[in-house]
Image: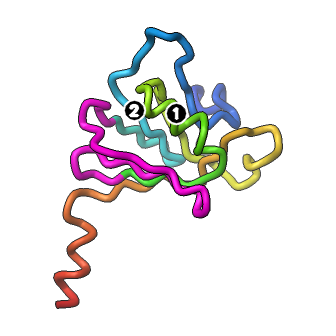
Amino acid sequence: MPTEATSAEGDKFSLILVGDRMEEHFLELRFRTGLRTAFAYSDLIFFNYDPESGTLDLDFGGYLITVKGRGLGERVFDGVKQKKVVWLKEADSEMQDHHGNDTFISAILITPPGFENQGEAAAA
């Protein structure tokens, strides 16, 4: 069930500050389930954008955040680099992916530290 904030956001998948001296302290992630979580920009170790796969990976102190979608390369990548992205939001449905949106986020995944190594340890 959409909340008031979700309804007001409509097909908007990010909020990015535009002022020269404006900077955000946290990056908020908004999931289609209504769950919201935030990571401190001060914990951001590295991030990269792969245009071929349409993914933006961000490492916040060992937590790997993977954002999948379209239009993440310029505006969102540059916004993260300048600490200006306030929030990113997953789409509620594929129907939100249309020509009117410069950005579309199909999924946001959080991988905790060490989680990717658990499968390797079990296989050994």
Check residue 78 in the rendering and tell me which mark sits there, or answer none.
1
Answer few, some or many: residues within 10 Å of disc 2's Cα (few below 14, many 20 plus, some between 14 and 19).
some
Say which residue appears at 57% left-offset and 33% top-offset: 14
Type of amino acid under label 1: Asp
Q: Nearer the viewer, residue 78 or 13?
A: 78
Corner quadrant of residue 99: top right
Say which residue appears at 39% left-offset and 46% top-offset: 47
Q: Nearer the viewer, residue 67 or 18?
A: 18
Q: Residue furthest right?
A: 99
Question: Would residue 71 be found to the left or right of residue 65 on screen?
Answer: right
Corner quadrant of residue 39: top left
Magenta stretch in the rendered image: 39-64
Say which residue appears at 56% left-offset and 16% top-offset: 18
Q: Secondary structure at mark 2?
A: strand
Q: Position of residue 16 (x, y in %)?
A: 54, 25
Spatial CA span between label 2 and label 1: 14 Å
Residue 111 to residue 32: above or below: below
Q: Position of residue 91 (x, y in %)?
A: 62, 47
Q: Position of residue 76 (x, y in %)?
A: 55, 37
Say which residue appears at 65% left-offset and 33% top-offset: 12
Q: Which residue is mark 2?
A: 27
Q: Are marks 2 and 1 in contact (CB under 8 Å)?
A: no
Residue 58 to residue 53: above or below: above
Type of amino acid under label 2: Leu
Would you say the magenta stretch is mainly helix, strand or loop?
strand
Q: Nearer the viewer, residue 114 or 32?
A: 114
Q: Residue furthest bottom?
A: 124
Q: Position of residue 20 (x, y in %)?
A: 50, 11
Does residue 59 show up magenta in the picture? yes
Check residue 30 in the rendering and tell me which mark sits there, or answer none.
none
